[in-house]
Image: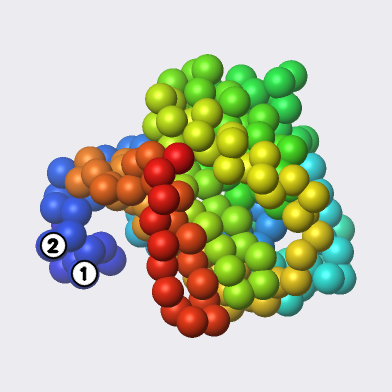
Amino acid sequence: MNGGRFERQLPLFGEDGQNKIMNATVGVAGCGGLGVTLVTMLAEAGVSHFILADPGYPEIEDISTQFIYAMSDPRPKAQTTAQWITAINPLAEIEVHCEPFSKETESMFGCCDVIADCIEDVEGSLLLADYACRSGKTLVHGRACGLEGIVAVAAPENASGLKRALEEARGLDEQPSVGAAVSAVASLEALEVLKIVSGIGTENVGLLVSLDMKSMTVEKTGL
């Protein structure tokens, strides 16, 4: 890989870690503001296997935080996101589900090495955390609200703690957002995914990382 497109990140992950990144399968629930930034960062880093799930279509209010969409494109978000990924990495293999994550559709993430939760509604995230707990999957959760955000890495044994934290966020689905803050949270979420799939690991398993982007402070609490 010397001299290739991943040369700058090889000192971080090593060649073995880079190969693991390229062979990992990442499930992405939600192709909104968090999701489009996350898949961009992962595809640029070499992730080549994605399973995408989102039932939505672009709306005018999405454009400020979801930079890959245009109102002239009538396709579902998941389909547009898949095309975006292949523009970054033409060799990427992508499975697209234009439907929401639910107990009836949860098998879509059965072969994933890690799942990234980019779902905007809390109820969907609760279902995903429950699935991660039952299936033994590692879940990386991200959420942005105004100039605040959270990133959490939940292994199966502490996914129930993430569920408790999400319960407290019920009713907070419709919140102000700005693209720069959403992208900042999604980039940190993507970095956690890369650390996990590369094998270098993360020190944030079982932790809820709260970001105050107005004061630029970070607080960590256990799940």
Q: In this image, 6 relative to 112: left or right?
A: left
All told, the count of numbered labels is: 2
* 190, above or below 129, in the image: below
Quarter the C terminus occupies:
top left
Q: Which residue is mark 2?
A: 11
> In the drawing, does residue 61 fall left or right of residue 216?
right
Please provide percent x and percent y for residue 60: 86, 71
Find residue 12 and report its horizontal and vertical position in percent. Answer: 18, 60
**Mark 2 element type:** helix
Q: Amino acid at mark 1?
A: Arg
**Numbered label attached to residue 8:** 1
Question: Can residue 163 be seen at all in this image of the molecule?
Answer: yes
Image position of 121 with respect to 128: above or below = below
Q: Residues within 10 Å of mark 2 (few under 14, many from 20)?
A: few
Could you say which is closer to the camera, residue 137 or residue 174? 174
Q: Is residue 79 visible?
A: no
Please give the name of the residue rendered at 59% of the width and 35% of the height, measured from the top-left corner: 163
